[in-house]
Image: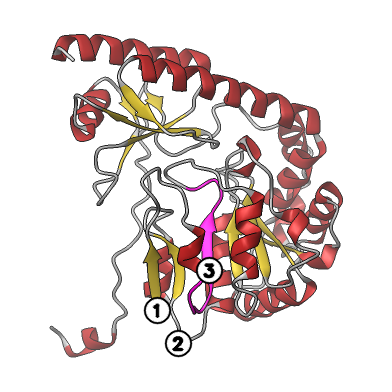
Amino acid sequence: MKLWEKNIRRVVPYVPGEQPDKPHMIKLNTNENPYPPAPGVAESLYAFDTDRLRLYPDASAGVLVRALAKRYRVQEDQVFVGVGSDDVLAMSFMTFFNSDKPILFPDVTYSFYDVWAEVFRIPYERVPLDGQFCICKEGYYKENGGVIFPNPNAPTGELESLDDIEDILRHNEDVIVIVDEAYIDFGGETALPLLDKYDNLLIVQTFSKSRSLAGMRIGYAFGSRELIGYLNDVKYSFNSYTMDHLALAAGVAALEDEAYFQETIHKIVSTRERVKAELQTLGFTCGDSQANFLFAAHKGLPAKKLFEALKEANIYVRYFQKPRIDNYLRITVGTDDEMDVLLDFLRGYLKQEGV
């Protein structure tokens, strides 16, 4: 080892989903929305005055903050925005998790949590999910330095009730509790109603899934004025101009078309429930996913073998070679046509394998 290497911060990085670019492929591995953004998004970009690009954007992202506050009926000083929910979450880890006590999150969950904890040198503990991959709320009653979990969870898709979330909050009023709601629009009830009761609650959402803007990178958080103020202090100490002009314009336009938003959500949920039932008839075990993906295991074939066979057929799904979930595939809900191709392949492959 070279002398200068001794002071390098080393972590095992997060591994993002594969981003292939092949003709006629079906991409169901990164939970992107299969439908385009609201029509107004394209119109806002076409109408944008490119001369403004020589100027810095508004550091406060005021136009988007105001639109979010109006849409979700909160005060503007209760809204924080960033470059995708990953940026918002990373800022939150830096801002709120600074105790010597471990933060708590599920043992099967979004795999960026432990990466951020390692990067920022935050002690952490993984709390096991139960046998149905649901959160055991009692596991969060212990002393800790903060709590974070997704709802619905990823990669399982399981949803926790608002009562259980409030129970976790009641047992953790002396630390920050972050509820990561990247998939909340596809099922379940947001924790937003709890903001008035708990000033230590931070709710993080994103435009990447339900609003079809994964490529634009827009994330946001809701919390008490105090929490959002602390987040902004860290943001302005780290990178003042996080949201660019085009992202701000696209985000506002997406929020303005509620009818299109509801239409695409309905299509994805309808397809999800149909495919969930069909996978079960093919011998798959599927949880009750309330996200825009399914978490499925087949009783007769290893997930890794299925993953490789699907990839050979230009159908991309996600496989995690990790304890407890190494026999599951996470399958993003695509269009009806895409999911029919997936189902047809699985029928043929399972018949070929004699299972």
Q: Label 1, on which residue?
A: 123
Residue 147, disc:
3
- In the rendered structure, which segment of residues is drawn in magenta? 141-153
**Is mark 1 in CB contact (under 8 Å) with mark 2?**
yes
Residue 210, disc:
none
Q: Label 2, on which residue?
A: 100
Q: Is residue 165 visible?
A: yes
Please tell me whether residue 47 is drawn above or below residue 137 in the rendered image. Answer: above
Amino acid bearing label 3: Val
Which of the marked residues, 1 or 2, is nearer the chain's N terminus? 2
Question: Disc 2 to disc 3, how far (Cα)?
Answer: 14 Å
For mark 3, does the 10 Å Cα neighbourhood hold few (<14), some (14 to 19), or many (20 or more) residues?
many
- Does residue 344 appear left or right of residue 96 in this picture? left
Based on the picture, tell me whether residue 145 belongs to the magenta stretch. Answer: yes
Q: Main secondary structure of the magenta part?
A: loop
Image x and y of residue 127, in percent: 40, 63
Q: Is residue 211 visible?
A: no
The residue at 40%/80% (across/down) is: 121
Q: Nearer the viewer, residue 231 or 178?
A: 178
Q: Which quadrant: the N terminus?
A: bottom left
Label 3 residue SS = strand
The residue at 50%/67% (across/down) is: 140
Q: In the displayed orientation, state which residue is furthest to the bottom.
A: 3
**Is mark 2 in CB contact (under 8 Å) with mark 3?**
no
Label 2 residue SS = loop
